[in-house]
Image (cartoon, grey):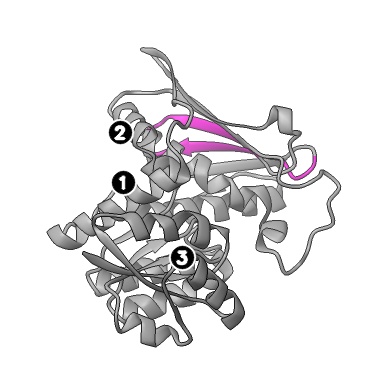
């Protein structure tokens, strides 16, 4: 059994990862830690587990940690956990800066740890299988649409809320790119332009020679919200299946894969930290292209 602690006390900790860990055949939920003691106590009570006041005290009794924190907090916490020799299930995006993402990758590699990033499309069984199959074919282009109605178009951004400041590019962008990079390969060039509200349009050129586009938004009308990916090539059009499994089922698959990586010593995974780094690197270039109004070469 993989002894696991949760870092964070928000919705994903209490309603997704916590219940999954409590019921998982390969894992034992040891406890939860967060920065606010009241929230930690409430989360621990909800999950029927131990509330830790000290992070290092929790790290001393677990094999792995699940981070459910914003990317602005994840970097330092991930480095602390890696230094303690703990395997990691990390939140997306891995970081908001490629240098920080590389620091996490290097720390994980130095300590020979298993580490995954919770890109839900890469852990949902039906979508993960589709991505693996699609990646074996030749494609000329692909398009992704990841739009949500999280905020009103004229909402007032809160400077302390990372989703408000980073926007759709960094919130739903990781989902779109985790699929695009999985199917078409590493990105080598990015162009970006704004749309209405917080909408962002990306054009990505991949090392394979294929190109892809992505439309991202958190302020789309509810009736127009969707998560869609389709690839185009000589064999026709192949559309990724809509999600059939829940985020909890995706989390269960992620924990199962992490436990197997720990048992086997395998360190490579389609949703591992290398993909997490590639996504952060591509999104950072897209942000630069958006601000400059030009394309950015990643090589």
Number of the label disc, if any, that sits on residue 47:
3
Taking depth in this image into account, of 230 and 61 the one nearest to the observer is 61
Q: Is residue 193 magenta?
A: no
Query: Residue 270's spot in the image, x, y percent?
Result: 31, 46
Which residue is labeled 1 in the image? 270
Mark closer to the chain start, 3 or 1: 3
Mark closer to the chain start, 2 or 1: 2
Predominant SS along the magenta part = strand
Residue under the point 39% across and 44% down: 249
Q: Is residue 246 above or below residue 263?
A: above
Q: Secondary structure at mark 1?
A: loop
Q: CA distance from mark 3 to mark 1?
A: 30 Å
Q: Is residue 231 above or below residue 157?
A: above
Q: CA distance from mark 2 to mark 1?
A: 9 Å
Point out the stretch of residues depicted in magenta: 197-216
Q: Is residue 163 something one can see in this rendering?
A: yes
Mark 3, Cα crowd under 10 Å, few <14 / some 14-19 / many 20+, is many
Which residue is labeled 2 in the image? 132
Q: CA distance from mark 3 to mark 2?
A: 34 Å
Query: Residue 130's spot in the image, x, y percent?
Result: 35, 29
Residue under the point 15% across and 61% down: 263
Q: Quadrant of residue 86?
A: bottom left
Q: Is residue 272 something one can see in this rendering?
A: no
Query: Residue 166's spot in the image, x, y percent?
Result: 66, 57
């Amino acid at each position: 059994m993989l002894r696991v602690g949760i870092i964070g006390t928000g919705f994903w900790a209490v309603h997704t990862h916590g219940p999954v860990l409590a019921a998982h055949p390969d894992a034992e939920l040891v406890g939860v830690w967060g920065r606010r003691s009241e929230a930690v106590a409430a989360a621990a009570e909800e999950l029927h587990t131990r509330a830790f006041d000290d992070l290092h005290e929790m790290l001393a009794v677990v094999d792995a940690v699940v981070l459910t924190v914003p990317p602005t907090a994840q970097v330092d916490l991930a480095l602390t956990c890696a230094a303690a020799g703990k395997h990691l299930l990390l939140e997306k995006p891995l970081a908001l800066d490629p240098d920080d993402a590389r620091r996490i990758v290097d720390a994980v590699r130095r300590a020979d740890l298993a580490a995954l990033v919770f890109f839900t499309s890469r852990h949902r069984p039906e979508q993960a299988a589709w991505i693996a199959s699609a990646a074996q074919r030749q494609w000329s282009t692909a398009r992704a649409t990841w739009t949500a109605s999280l905020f009103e178009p004229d909402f007032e951004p809160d400077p302390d809320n990372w989703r408000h400041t980073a926007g759709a590019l960094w919130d739903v962008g990781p989902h779109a790119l985790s699929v695009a990079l999985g199917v078409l390969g590493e990105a080598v060039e990015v162009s970006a332009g704004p749309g209405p509200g917080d909408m962002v349009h990306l054009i990505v050129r991949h090392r394979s020679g294929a190109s892809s586009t992505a439309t991202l938004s958190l302020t789309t009308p509810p009736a127009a919200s969707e998560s869609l990916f389709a690839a185009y090539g000589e064999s026709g059009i192949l559309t990724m299946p809509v999600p059939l499994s829940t985020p909890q089922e995706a989390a269960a698959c992620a924990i199962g894969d992490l436990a197997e990586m720990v048992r086997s010593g395998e360190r490579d995974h389609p949703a591992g930290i290398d993909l997490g780094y590639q996504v952060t690197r591509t999104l950072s270039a897209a942000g630069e292209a958006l601000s400059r109004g030009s394309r950015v070469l990643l090589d």
